[in-house]
């Protein structure tokens, strides 16, 4: 396990040690291969299916997944005199796919999600982390 994963997820708490451990494994794998798909990042099908089960678990929400990273980001912000909290909205277009929760984008024929993110950066453009996500 990469040392940065342990630090980044120091406060992870899904109220289930198995989910906490799985979150660390997923971040370690995806962090080691950031451009890869989940199956390509994981070490075999057992790990891949474990990751899919993790994301399908009712205790796993976007806010719970982000919580420990948000805590680590706040610690990094405290180390700087100035941090900028930048918000942006991205359209995630999934037209033609049936996805639960997807809705119309700015053109009603397009289906997908709006993803609102708040990113903390320094004036020198050092990324400190994500503070909030709303989809």
Image: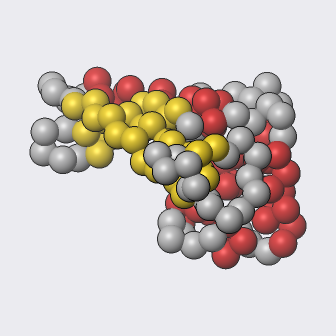
Q: Residue furthest front?
A: 108
Q: Nearer the viewer, residue 29 or 113?
A: 113
Identify which residue is drawn at 83% across, 34% down.
Answer: 58
Q: Residue at point 80% right, 56% down?
A: 52
Is residue 64 in sight in this rendering? yes
Foreground of the two, 132 or 42: 132
77 vs 114, left or right, is left
x and y, in percent, of residue 57 in the image = 84, 40
- In which image quadrant can residue 40 be found? bottom right
Picture coordinates of residue 85, whole percent (x, y): 28, 30
49 over 115 or under it: above or below? below
Quarter residue 37 falls in? bottom right
Image coords of residue 96 (percent x, y): 68, 65
Q: How many marks can you see?
A: 0
Residue at image x 57%, y 72%? Answer: 36
* Whether residue 68 is visible: no
Quadrant in the picture for the C terminus: top right
Q: Quadrant of residue 103?
A: top right
Is 61 left, or right, of 63 in this rendering? right
Quarter in which the N terminus is drawn? bottom right
Q: Which residue is located at x 67 percent, y 46 percent?
A: 102
- Looking at the image, residue 38 sits to the left or right of residue 56; the answer is left
Relative to 102, residue 84 above or below: above
In the drawing, does residue 73 fall left or right of residue 46? left
């Amino acid at each position: 396990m990469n040392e940065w994963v342990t630090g980044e997820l120091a406060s992870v708490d899904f109220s289930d040690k198995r989910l906490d451990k799985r979150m660390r494994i997923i971040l370690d794998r995806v962090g080691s291969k950031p451009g890869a798909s989940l199956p390509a990042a994981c070490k075999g099908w057992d790990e891949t299916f474990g990751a899919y089960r993790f994301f399908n678990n009712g205790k796993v929400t976007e806010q719970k997944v982000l919580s420990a990273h948000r805590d680590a980001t706040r610690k990094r912000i405290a180390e700087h005199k100035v941090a900028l909290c930048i918000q942006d909205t991205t359209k995630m277009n999934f037209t033609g796919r049936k996805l639960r929760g997807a809705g119309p984008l700015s053109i009603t024929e397009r289906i997908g999600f709006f993803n609102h993110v708040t990113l903390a950066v320094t004036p020198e453009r050092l990324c400190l982390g994500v503070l909030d996500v709303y989809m």
